[in-house]
Every structure is written in C-alpha cells, then in structure tokens.
Amino acid sequence: MNQTLRDTILATLEDFSNDEDGLLVEMRQLVAEHGKSVYSVILNILASIDLSNAEAENYWQKIILHYAEMKSDLGRSVSLRTAICDYFCTVHKYLKNPKVIEIHLYEKTAQFSKLDELTGLLNRRVFNEVFTREVSRAERHHSDLSLLFFDLDNFKLINDTYGHLGGDLILKSVAEIIRKRKRIEDVAVRYGGEEILLLLPDTPKVHAHEIGERIRQEIDEARFVYEGRVLKVTISGGLASYPYDTTAPQRLVEAADSALYSAKAAGKNRIVLFSGDKRRYVRVDCHGDIKLKEQRFNDDIMHAAQCRDISRGGMMVESSDNISPGTRLLTQFTLQDEKQQLFASTVVRVEPSSEDKFNIGMSFLDIDYRTGNELAGFVMNRI
C-alpha cells in the first residue's frame, strides 16, 4: 500500500473531521489526482478491510447512498464514519464486532508494531507479509523483483571492542543510510541481528546492483563517533533477482543469502550476485579485441578489452583497466557477417584475473528483439 497516499488521506480525515460534505469533495479530488486506489486505502483506514480498488469503489458508492439515506431517515446530520460502520455491520455485514478508536492512536500503534525498535526499519514479521504480496505481484505481472541481503562485517568484533551500545550505534547508523538511500517503493527490513534486507520491486538485477553498490560505498566511506572514538564499518551484500536467478521468487531469500555467503568468503565489503548452477542464458567462449566506451559528462574514456565469453544477456571480457561495478559502457562487438554492433551495458562484476588484468562481467541493457535474435544466433552457432 502506498504510504504517501495513506498519509495524505489520514491528514484529509483529520482536516475535515467536522465537515462531512467537505470531506466528500476532497475525496473526489484525491481520486482525480491519485486514481481509484484512494477507495481501497480509505476503507482500509476506516474499517481495516483489504479490498481491491474495484471492490472498494463499488462499496464506497453504496456507502455514500447509505449515508444519504441515514441522514434522511434520522432527520439530522450523520457522520460518514458512522455510516460506514452501520453499512458494514447491518447491510453488508462485513464487520461483526467493530471497535471504536481514534484513527491517529490506531495508526501510531499499528506503525510501532511494524517497526524494529532499534533501527526503525520494518521487522521480519512485516517483511513476510510484504514479500508474499510482492512475489504474487511479480508473478502476476511478469515483472522483476530483486532482493539485497546485507550483513555488517565483523560485527561481533565491534560488539566485543566497543560494547553493545557501540554496536547499536553502528547498526542504527547503517540502517539510517539504507533508509535514506532506498527509493519510496523499496522495502528495508531488519531481518535479524545485523542482517538487513532490501526488497526492490520492479527492479532488474543490474539496477539493483547499482543501488546496492551505492549503499555499500557510502557505508564504507562513513565514519561514526562513539564516546570520542571514530569507528568505521563495512557491509557485505548478496543479490538475487526474479526471474533472472530463479523462476520461483519464493527462493529469492535463499539465493540472496547464498550470494551473501560468497561475498563474505571473497573478502567482505562487496556485493556479490547470485550465480546458480543453471544460467538463464547459454554462454559460449569468444575471442577477439573489443572496445568499451565509458561515457562521462565532460569526455568519454575508451577501454581496450578482450572477449572471454558471451550470452544473450551479457559478456565477460578481460581488460587491464579496473572498471567499477555499475559503470555504463557502450560495447562495440562484431556479430555474424562481420557486422559491427554497439551494445549498451552495465558492469556487474569485477575480479582480478592476473597481476595486472581483470575479468569484467557486463550485462546488456535494453536490447531490441532483432538484436537479441542476432545475439542468440551468434551464440547457438558456436555451441
């Protein structure tokens, strides 16, 4: 549920608590601005009922008629809240034993029940509910769903050295960085101990990796002061995405946790992408020089590289240049019939291959149907 819209409706209910006609006018204005989701949000607020937008709109129209009938029958003014309660208790009989409570008190209590007391992030119980909803939405709309599984590095040593109060300060500060850097639609959760999950709806793996890298880098550069001492901490992360890594989005947590384990084993302070035994795309070896153009505001930087393998989804190259993850590149490559192609790509992984060279994994961006078929044909001809 859109928290911003919910907050707007709560403020509207407060502003028009003694003006029913004004409230109805304002509700119509909100629907014009935000769409029919306004109906489901206001009925959830006032009656704690979860309805689809279409169902909520239907009930809302019937409630307005019921509200007018109650005023006519009683010959006096009636609160819209009273009409809603009466409708769901006596007409539709959705509610059996409703409890009367001030909205702001209920919202405050409900909000606290969702939050982790230390970090202010959502707690694990709420994550399970949100995750189930987002999984269903990703499956229904065939959309991307990514999950970053963060864990503070050497947190036990921090607690042992500075005590639990020092550890709490670090954990709260890291959570605050994640909360500020996430988007409105992202869901940040304290999963347990020093583990923090970031669920990213409608976000492909490449973009999720960029978000994770920005968070990791900011935490790496941050300094925290506790009792006059400057503390530094790093964070590791594992990333998994649906449908890139699994066709069963319920396995995202397991896959992201596995990638996190790899990040720890590789030396910590890094984001590792989940890589299962089965790849989404077949990869084949390739050879030859390619050109990588890094586009910047003032000028472009050219990188020389050699192709190592390629798939419909990306390419692995070797270069003497250490190109940072998240860097956007234009890749010039020769397909069938010596045809030159330019591919937009993003660096998703960098690993040393020798003392002075690096293996650079790139994911192609926004490939059109024709080019995708050419890439697939190029790969299949080499299997």
Image (spheres, helix red, strand yellow):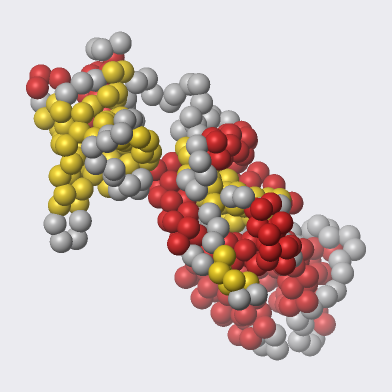
Q: Position of residue 320 (x, y in %)?
A: 23, 37
- Residue at 47% over, 70% down: 33
Give above or below for 118 relative to 191: below
Q: Position of residue 369 (x, y in %)?
A: 26, 31
* Foreground residue among 110 and 12: 110
Q: Position of residue 106 (x, y in %)?
A: 78, 72
Q: Position of residue 72 (x, y in %)?
A: 76, 81
- Residue 382 in which image quadrant: top left
In the image: residue 310, left or right of residue 189: left
- Residue 16 in which image quadrant: bottom right
Residue that protrudes farthest toward the right in the picture: 97
Give above or below for 95 relative to 373: below
Give above or below for 79 relative to 158: below
* Foreground residue among 286 and 250: 286
- Residue at 28% over, 18% down: 285
Tell me if I can see residue 129 in this picture: no
- Residue at 68% over, 59% down: 161
In the image: residue 177, left or right of residue 313: right
| The N terminus lies in quadrant | bottom right
